Amino acid sequence: MNKESYTISKICCIGAGYVGGPSMAVIADNCPELEINIVDVNEERIKRWNHDDLKNIPVYEPKLEEIVSRVRGKNLFFSTNVFKEIESADIIFLCVNTPTKTQGFGAGKASNLKWLEICARQIAENAKGHTIIVEKSTVPVRTAEVLKNILITNTKKSFSILSNPEFLAEGSAINDLNNPDRILIGGEDKKAIEALSDIYAKWIDKNKIIKTNLWSSELSKLTSNAFLAQKISSINSISALCEKTGADIEEVAKAVGADKRIGDKFLASGPGFGGSCFQKDLLNLIYLCEYFNLDEVAKYWESVLNINLWQQKRISRLIVEKLFGTLNEKKIAILGFSFKANTNDTRESPAIKICMDLLKEGSFLNIHDPKVTSKQINKELKDYSKNEEYNFYNENSWEKTLDIDEALKDASAVVILTEWEVYKDIDWENKEFLMSSPAWIFDTRTITERKSINKTNLNYWRIGNEF
Ligand code: UDX
Ligand code: ADP
């Protein structure tokens, strides 16, 4: 390292969530010489990260427990000492939440940067020496400018701001962090970019590190998520057409995805995308386009979001229709509440809207999920009931079941909403007796096989394959 470079020995990460926790654990694992302190204002969350029994850490992610057990207390620490850790850090990663604004200008579209702004003020007050600030949370384009303004006007200290968006997908986070397709670093200060790049270069090929200006980096993250979401809405729109024409969505996806220009990933038709990123980032992109009077562009991306909502609605409607137009007094088993398999995250999960629609029709739900707690399910449903259309919500109209059998017991239908491995292994021939005949299976994730269901007396609907 030459004299002109920054020396990095201590990292502070603000935000111990789905991004901060796994990404810092992987840096700690690959860079034993660095000390990493993850801080969060949420005491309960920090307590769980420090829990002796690793089963209690707040983020469920395959291989995460293993890594945390290796590095926690060695070079990775969790605490609520936000000010102290900011003060001694050479580099600070911002991994706080940036949900969609619920009120004020841009409500329903723009991101709420409240938490990011609070962090910037805390940093302005407590940082010592030169500090590199890394935006890792997904943020709207030109957020770095907001950070810069707060840091520069509030202090005489010096800062470099970098944008380093995280591309990990939940459920495969550890693998994504250890073997990313690319690392993106945007910024103006070349020395700061090199310092961050040197950390990643400890385990990632330097050719995969893309360096851009700040705004390209921020916009690339929104665009990547918008393209991925667009692929899902495209295949979901075709799933409905398959059901009308006799085509099979999996056969179509396979044939279409074999074209290298299209690619075979992200073509699994399902109940629509959930998670904390796709909807939020699409809304950000739409807001940005509208702000710059690019109405056609805004409408284009809006249609990706509309198809997603439509897909969820059409599934709920279809279930009601197949069950003779009424769900009153009927029990329905819901298999899976997380927004995808291998995560306990339920943010924007399609299960929320579909469950609420089924509850609205008078059904009682037996909900099963291997990793989501009943407290979490209740919070999601309750939050959603703030929409006027769903203010009928009653906490006693569902229960979380401990196992799959209990969920199926006396149910008129089972709806598979998450593609958890345990649901793929269900032997339906041995389960149908638990249900209330004539029972239905609604498979929104194409994880069941028509051949084996045909051996049972169950009625069957599988997304994108009606015949
Ligand atoms: C996404 C991006 O993949 C990641 O790069 C970014 O950093 C954050 O947002 P994530 O939301 O964690 O990651 O998971 P992802 O695997 O992208 O799935 C998002 C949603 O799309 C899930 O609800 C999933 O079930 C759905 N999906 C995904 C499909 O319906 N079909 C597919 O083929 C792929
Ligand atoms: P993500 O999926 O982006 O990681 P999460 O909601 O899982 O989002 O995590 C964000 C974390 O950031 C939360 O645990 C929240 O308590 C924390 N947080 C938000 N603002 C601050 C702040 N000013 N200081 C410390 N922690 C914060």
Image (cartoon, rainbow, N blue to C red):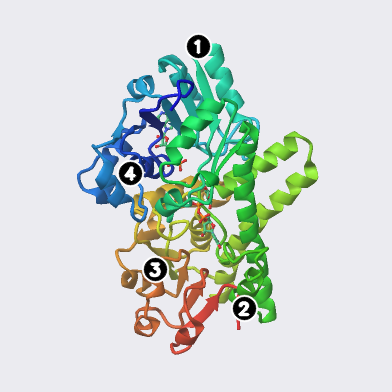
Q: CA distance from mark 4 to mark 1?
A: 34 Å
Quadrant containing the C terminus is bottom right
Q: Earlier in the sequence, mark 3 or mark 2?
A: 2
Q: Amino acid at mark 1?
A: Thr
In front: label 1 or label 2: 1
Specify the amino acid type for callout 3.
Glu
Mark 3–mark 2 distance (CA, rounded to whole Å): 22 Å
Residue in view at x 23 percent, y 37 percent: 73
**Image quarter for residue 253?**
bottom right
Answer with mark 3 or mark 4, whichever residue precedes in sequence: 4
Q: What is the C-alpha distance between the residues marked 1 and 3?
A: 52 Å
Secondary element under disc 1, as helix, strand or loop, is loop
Q: Is residue 185 above or below residue 462?
A: above
Q: Is mark 3 within 8 Å of ligand 1?
A: no
**Residue at the far left in the pictured view:** 52
Q: Is mark 1 within 8 Å of ligand 2?
A: no
User: Which image quarter is the N terminus in?
Assistant: top left
Residue drawn at x 30%, y 34% as measured from the top left: 78
Mark 1 — residue?
155
Picture residue at 68% right of the left edge, 77% below the top: 244
Residue that carries the numbered disc 4 in the rendered image: 29
Residue behind mark 3: 421
Residue on which disc 2 sits: 248
